[in-house]
Amino acid sequence: MTTNKQKIIECVPNFSEGKDVKTFDAIKEAIYKTENVKLLSLEPDADYNRVVVTLAGNEEGILNGAVNACKAAASFIDMTKHKGEHPRLGAIDVVPFVPVSNVTTEECVKISEKFAEIISKELNVPVYLYESAARKPERKSLSNIRQGEYEGLEAKLKDPNWAPDYGEPAFNPKLGAIVTGSRFFLIAYNVNINSTDVKYAKEIAEILRESGYSKRDENGNLIKIDGKTVKVPGRLKEFKGMGVSLEKYSCTQVSINLTNYNVTPLHVAFEEVKKESIRLGVEVKGSEIVGLVPLEALLQAGRYYTESKETDEKKLVQAAIDHLGLNSLNPFKPEEKIIEYMI
């Protein structure tokens, strides 16, 4: 469990195939054969007909790993035959590069641009840049670029406003188009509420999430001004949340996406949910991190709970696990959950 100053970048390609094992094996093999990159997870979803792959490595490794994985997937996936519930623009739907440690968003933007240049030529496919790499404001949002999806892509490419950032504005029926760029690390984080009534988790999520909630009058009707619903902003920035039931564990959860843990850290999200729970007369019973987490996010929580009196990395991580109750539903194993410990 050593953490040196090497640059670690995560890449999370989403491919439009959720069932075919041959495709998954080809993607895995392509990553295994690439130096300085490691496959961290491959999670298919048959209902969405989509697979999310997570790999991490240094600058050279992550670029080559992403290119090789995409080329492998492209040889198997045919969008003319694809059906799936999830919005998608092509076979290789989105390829975000995410800074994990000792690397900046700007460096990840440059990697995404190199990736776009290479993959557009290798696969003869149009590529759009989004999020931090976007060159036009309307392309910052992935859902904006995806509008019309694969089925509307041929017409979209004829519109000069939607000329790709890389590659020709020509429709590739087999592969569609690719979106790439850089975004901050998203932590999928759930706080457990010791109640089977989801109304508490929903109310807490509405109060805390950045987007807030729609204002209502005393009769429960939406309040509108000039035809627009009045919104009450939430308390926490970079916090997306909703209330969900977790029948398996006879509890409910405030299901959270922390889109920038430097703005709203894990411990702040947890303590604010706890504060609202007390107000509503329900109890928080720990929390869970879904997927992987950067070491720094746990160190921040560890420093908070030890009042910055502790400096030992292992003890700080343990303090975060204990105070956030990360073992409450399933064992939290640092070596399997913290990205830096997996590489």
Image (cartoon, grey):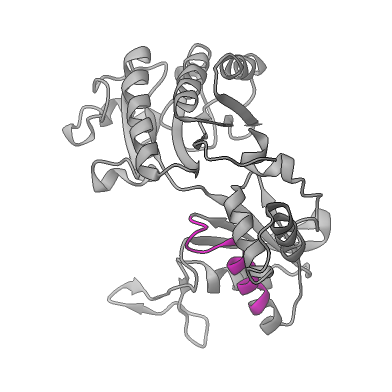
Residue lying at 43% horizontally and 73% vertically, measured from the top left: 233
- Frontmost residue, 279 versus 83: 279
Q: Is residue 305 on the magenta stretch?
A: no
Quadrant housing the N terminus: top right
* Quarter of the view holding residue 338: top right
Residue stretch rendered in magenta on the structure: 260-275
Can residue 266 be seen in the rendering of this structure? Answer: yes
Residue lying at 54% horizontally and 36% vertically, measured from the top left: 85
User: What x and y, as percent, mark residue 305?
Assistant: 68, 69
Q: Main secondary structure of the magenta part?
A: helix
In this picture, residue 312 sits left or right of residue 186: right
* Quarter of the view holding residue 304: bottom right
Residue found at the far left of this picture = 160
Can residue 45 be seen in the rendering of this structure? Answer: no
- Frontmost residue, 267 versus 130: 267
In this picture, residue 180 sits left or right of residue 167: right
Residue lying at 50% horizontally and 24% vertically, measured from the top left: 61
In this rendering, is residue 21 above or below 212? above
In this rendering, is residue 126 above or below 159? above
- Frontmost residue, 12 versus 109: 109
User: What x and y, as percent, mark residue 267?
Assistant: 62, 66
In this rendering, is residue 20 above or below 57? above
In this rendering, is residue 126 above or below 107? above
User: What x and y, as percent, mark residue 168?
Assistant: 24, 20
In this picture, residue 60 sits left or right of residue 42: left
User: What x and y, as percent, mark residue 335?
Assistant: 73, 41
Report how many numbered discs are placed on residues in the image.
0
Quadrant housing the C terminus: top right
